[in-house]
Image (spheres, rainbow, N blue to C red):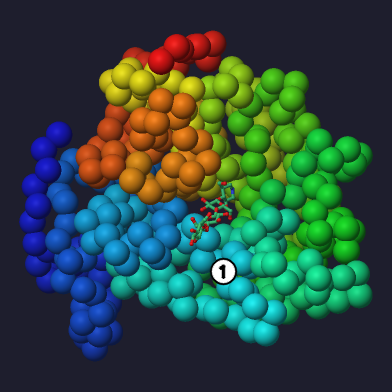
Amino acid sequence: MKNHQILFSRRDFLKHFGKGLTGAALTAALAQIPSWVMAQTIDDPPLRTRAARKGILFGAEAMQSELIADHEFATHFINECGILVPGNELKWHMLRPTSSGFNFQPADWLASFAQNANLQLRGHTLIWGDSLPAWFMNTVKDNNAASYLKDHIAAVAGRYAGQVHSWDVVNEPIMPWDGRSDGLRNSVWLKTLGPNYIDMAFEAAAAADPEALLVLNQNFLEYDAPKWTGFRTKTLQLLERLKSSNVPIHALGIQAHLRSDYGEFNQESFRNFLHEVANMGLMIMITELDVYDANLPLETGLRDSLVAGQYEEFLSVALNEPAVNTVITWGLSDKYTWYTDNGARADNSPVRPLPLDDGFNRKLAWKAMADVFDNKPPVKIKAPRDFHFKD
Ligand code: G3I
């Protein structure tokens, strides 16, 4: 693949990023775009274009700290992506570092970055049992938890109303290992408000931003070894309950942190699971796709093939289901991935879980995704699941 750096003309800007803008609005938008944003890498059509041709929205997670400091990364991000997901900036611990107020600055910066670059914006996440600020546990109790939940959603979803493609209203509510018959995670929200906290959150989000798609985002839905099956059955049970109670939920988010050490990827059972969700009238979004590679061999070519094979196999099945309309990777480049801190390799070699390498070159994983989007015959790579390596 060849990379050609070119400077975008005003006409190119209109074609790629300024759709729908005219007159003063266009002049204002152009003035806000720093010159480096206009320098794009033009190559084979980017993932967003290939996905869009098939009616799929493609994008990735990124953080303000990465986009603000690394112009080359930002350029590649805008080139490849149609939607931006703030990695942490919309979580409680960043929005509410103290009990006395909100800090919207990082999230506001990302919202205007997205708007200026004509990226859609995803909201992650309104209600989650993790990433709560230190003051939260001492302050939020049974008698005030409902107010905190509703006020937070009104303030945050209300602030960005009309700008957000979709909100992860509740993140990771299912945790069958907590032992409850409904499979709900025994989070602080469940402990203080009971199972109804989920209904309450969706109602509040619908009131605050009637235009956003409202999503329940869940992890551990990708594999069907006995350890994982409860995540699927309890998620389906919860979705059925919410739908039958007319709770305003529009989509299931499947995180898709793929790992070959989680067992065989069973195409048929995953296809059936997607069907069951779709049959409830819900859309499905792949929200946090990446491939753990700390258990894969050191050799880069082989490792990249195995990673790409997992992208290819998973996405081929997922995109066969018409209800799946969005694919988002959790990061775009290996330079910025949560696995650097949370899934490092024993050999200390940098991890390679994403479509672009740490120099922003397109990897086999990018090619695998492009091919699935193009609906070409699958890349002839099969990722062995029982692979064990000695590095
Ligand atoms: O910013 C501080 C930094 O100043 C400090 O030196 C460092 C020390 O640990 O911590 C930094 O904050 C970390 C933050 O990421 C920014 O990198 C937090 O400790 C860390 O907890 C936080 O982790 C995030 C994690 O969610 C928890 O919120 C990851 O970046 C983020 O990628 C990860 O994303 C989650 C999704 O929200 C939900 N699904 C799973 C996914 C991966 O775990």
- Which residue is painted at 61% across and 31% down in the image? 222
Q: Is residue 307 left or right of residue 35?
A: right
Q: Quadrant of residue 29?
A: bottom left
- Which residue is painted at 40% across and 65% down in the image? 64
Foreground residue, 211 or 256? 256
Foreground residue, 165 or 145? 145
- Which residue is painted at 38% across and 38% down in the image? 354
Q: Residues within 10 Å of mark 1 (few under 14, many from 20)?
A: some
- Is the distance from the Cβ of mark 1 to the nearest ligand 1 atom less than 8 Å? no
Give amino acid for label 1.
Met
Which part of the image, by quadrant, shows the C terminus? top left
Q: Percent position (x, y) of residue 266?
A: 60, 19
Q: Percent position (x, y) of residue 179?
A: 88, 38
Q: Is residue 166 visible?
A: no
Q: Is residue 314 left or right of residue 119?
A: right
Q: Percent position (x, y) of residue 73?
A: 27, 55
Q: Is residue 362 above or below residue 248?
A: above
Q: Is residue 364 above or below residue 157?
A: above
Residue topped by disc 1: 94
- Which residue is painted at 41% across and 25% down in the image? 347
Q: Is residue 97 visible?
A: yes
Which part of the image, by quadrant, shows the N terminus? top left
Q: Is residue 242 left or right of residue 365?
A: right
Secondary structure under the numbered disc 1 in the rendered image: helix
Which quadrant does ligand 1 occupy? bottom right
